[in-house]
Amino acid sequence: MASRKNGSVARERLSRDTIVDGAIALADAEGLDAVTIRRLAQDHKVTPMALYWHFKDKGELLDGIAERLFADVRLPVPSRKPWPEQLRAILEALSDALRPHPAVAGLVSDRVLSSEAGLIVAERTLALLRHAGLSTEQAAQVGGYLLNAVAMLVTTEPGREYGPDSEARDDAIRRKTASLSGLPLRRYPSIVSSANVLAACPSPDAYFRLGLDMLIAGVTATAEQGSVAANPA
Amino acid sequence: MASRKNGSVARERLSRDTIVDGAIALADAEGLDAVTIRRLAQDHKVTPMALYWHFKDKGELLDGIAERLFADVRLPVPSRKPWPEQLRAILEALSDALRPHPAVAGLVSDRVLSSEAGLIVAERTLALLRHAGLSTEQAAQVGGYLLNAVAMLVTTEPGREYGPDSEARDDAIRRKTASLSGLPLRRYPSIVSSANVLAACPSPDAYFRLGLDMLIAGVTATAEQGSVAANPA
DNA sequence: ACCTGAACACCGTTCAAGT
DNA sequence: ACCTGAACACCGTTCAAGT
């Protein structure tokens, strides 16, 4: 009847989960900068200090967001397919979980080993890389690299810099294209001639497919060069 | 004769360059969160409002930092070497410029096309990718991917999460190793068995070399698959 | 052109207290 | 166990003014 003045509905009771829910929804709608202890409290119709019972400080809240993102990863069931395919399935599962929340996707970097959900993703990835023939050191480095790279792909997803709004977005793209096209052709031939695709970057899906292709290809090359155990042919 | 109470020396006069200098030095020493209009003003013995004559707002200051990083890139002279080698030289030049300033390296993402220094790096990269046989769309996407990936490598450089301090660092690494080793072996066999290398990640240099190797290998695979113009053999 | 001063609407967080 | 109230030391930024 009354209520629902702000972004999210008032809950019966506060909990870590409901607070993280609200934080992610707020970040999706207004960006990570809008995620503020005071703003979250307001959305939950509660005093800012109430949140401090559930989280030691704001850092712990951000940890909670990262943990939730990892928990949303629907890992593929292990199979007997070639390892590059299995690796791709894992990376796709991760990117599927992150892509709906580009504003907070970067939080997963450096937080993989700090939550149970993150550990599960890391374990599967490491196991697969070891199976591909990498040494423990290589697997650790490549594994970290891969998870960070997927998060990076989501964070830098083309078009996101202009905001989600469609009309203002098109306008910004048109302005950017014009500004790039107007650059001195002598000094920036490649940029001028691809001004439209640089400003617009047609399809996020294509960007993602290409990014994952390059990641897998990079790992494959490393595995072939570093060891022959997994590929005796 | 007095003065030098704070981090950086008081300058004769304020300018965009001196402010950016101070901002980068402050970020190097205390992290990006310490970079604050008020703190910079204090370091320069000036009122916070003084900075607003040189920068419209804080965002423009961050743009200035990114521009400076791009300006520090010592691009290799063009040569007739195979393109993968030239590409590696460009990416190494970029990472050489970013690695001394990991706290601000992430600022270059999404800002490549917003400054002259960034445009020069982008132009060289795009030209080389086109020369490798990529289409304009592919070159634009791969180019963006590569620059973002290098910035990511610098930002996530292993060991950085524990701060630059050496004694506290070793302590944190030992704690992390112990905590990972104590995980249930049944559920996390790969993590437990590589706990030490996961927590410590031996050499940043090795991480970088491997990261660049994987990036180049990924581009090579894409170029071979997408076109045969550059590699008719 | 370049900088100061006072003020405003925000932050995260501590500490003591209520129920 | 779970939340409130008041206070503190910070933010970025606007607006009017000084030189």
Image (cartoon, coloured by chain):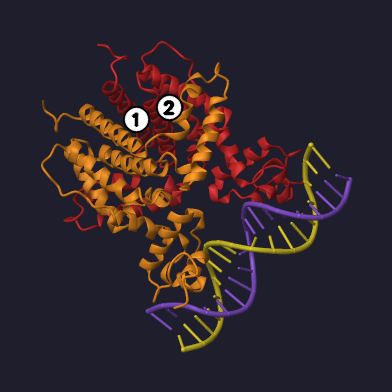
Chain colours: A red, B orange, C purple, D yellow
Name the residue type under label 1. Leu
- What is the secondary structure assignment of the residue under circle 2? helix
- Graded by Cα atoms within 10 Å as few (under 14), some (14 to 19) or many (20 or more), the crowding at tag 1 reads many
Residue at mark 1: chain: A
Q: Are marks 1 and 2 in contact (CB under 8 Å)?
A: yes
Name the residue type under label 2. Leu
Tell me, for residue B122, which label it has, or none. Answer: none
User: For residue A144, which quarter of the picture?
Assistant: top left
User: For residue B13, which quarter of the picture?
Assistant: bottom left
Tell me, for residue A91, which label it has, or none. Answer: 2
Q: Residue at x 12, y 45 (%)?
A: B79
Residue A1, can we see it?
Answer: no
Q: How far from the left and from the top, in percent, is residue B166?
A: 47, 45
Q: Which residue is mark 1?
A: A215
Residue B210, can we see it?
Answer: yes
Q: Is B48 placed above or below B163 here?
A: below
Q: How far from the left and from the top, in percent, is residue B40?
A: 48, 65
Quarter of the image that includes the N terminus of chain B: bottom left
Residue A99 as seen in the image, left or right of residue A185: right
Q: Residue at x 58, y 42 (%)?
A: A62
- What is the secondary structure assignment of the residue under circle 1? helix
Q: Residue at x 38, y 48 (%)?
A: B109
Q: How far from the left and from the top, in percent, is residue A58?
A: 62, 46
Quarter of the image that includes the C terminus of chain B: top left
